[in-house]
């Protein structure tokens, strides 16, 4: 981890809407925000630990399966809220709660953690997001940029 702020886009672009975290992270990467590192391609917990180790802020973006489903609905969650969600919030196998617990034991957790979970319609085989989920990407990007801005040194009253 080289940036003070890391954005992690989780998901699988070959499983339809499960790729929404990666799509949103790619859009954030295109903005080239100073002091922000964008990471995708994480398929196991150690990759997530490596990505957020040493970060002041980790913003994780991931697909979520919810019942009842509201495809395209975006939820901002703290770590505590993510851990309390029944059945978890992720649509795949990287368990953020267990990974964070492991990171705590190893001293490899970010100072602050925010999860943006986008509810999905389809995680079956296929490339591309459904229209409702694709429409949520700009919203997630705006929310993530706002979160990052709130956590930049200049916005917290420090010399930058």
Image (cartoon, helix red, strand yellow):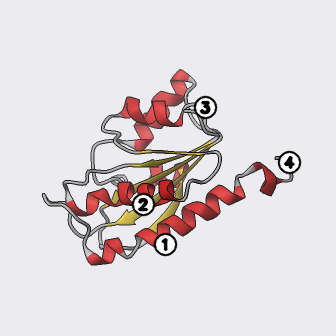
Q: Specify the label residue 24 is tagged with.
A: 2
Q: Earlier in the sequence, mark 2 or mark 1?
A: 2
Q: Specify the label residue 54 is tagged with.
A: 3
Residue picked out by circle 1: 139
Per the image, label 3 sits on a secondary structure element best described as loop
Q: Nearer the viewer, mark 2 or mark 3?
A: 2
Q: Is residue 21 above or below residue 99?
A: below
Question: Residue 154's spot in the image, x, y percent?
Answer: 80, 53
Depth check, front residue: 18 or 145: 145
Q: Is residue 21 above or below residue 43?
A: below
Q: Are marks 2 and 1 in contact (CB under 8 Å)?
A: no
Say which residue appears at 30% left-offset and 73% top-offset. Answer: 68
Local packing at callout 2 (Cα closer than 10 Å; few below 14, some 14-19, many 20+) is many
Question: Residue 111's spot in the image, x, y percent?
Answer: 65, 39
Per the image, label 4 sits on a secondary structure element best described as loop
Q: Is residue 134 above or below residue 54?
A: below
Say which residue appears at 28% left-offset and 77% top-offset. Answer: 131
Q: Name the image quarter holding the N terminus.
A: top right
């Amino acid at each position: 981890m080289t940036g003070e702020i890391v954005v992690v886009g989780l998901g699988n672009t070959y499983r339809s809407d499960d790729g929404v975290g990666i799509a949103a992270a790619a859009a954030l990467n295109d903005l080239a925000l100073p002091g922000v590192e964008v990471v995708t391609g994480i398929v196991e917990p150690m990759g997530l630990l490596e990505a957020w180790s040493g970060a002041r802020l980790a913003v994780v973006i991931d697909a979520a399966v919810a019942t009842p489903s509201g495809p395209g609905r975006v939820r901002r969650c703290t770590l505590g809220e993510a851990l309390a969600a029944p059945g978890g919030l992720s649509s795949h196998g990287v368990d953020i709660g267990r990974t964070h617990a492991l990171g705590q034991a190893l001293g490899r957790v970010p100072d602050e953690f925010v999860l943006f979970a986008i509810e999905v319609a389809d995680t079956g085989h296929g490339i591309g997001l459904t229209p409702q989920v694709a429409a949520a990407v700009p919203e997630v990007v705006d929310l993530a940029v706002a979160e990052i801005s709130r956590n930049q040194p200049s916005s917290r009253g420090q010399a930058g």
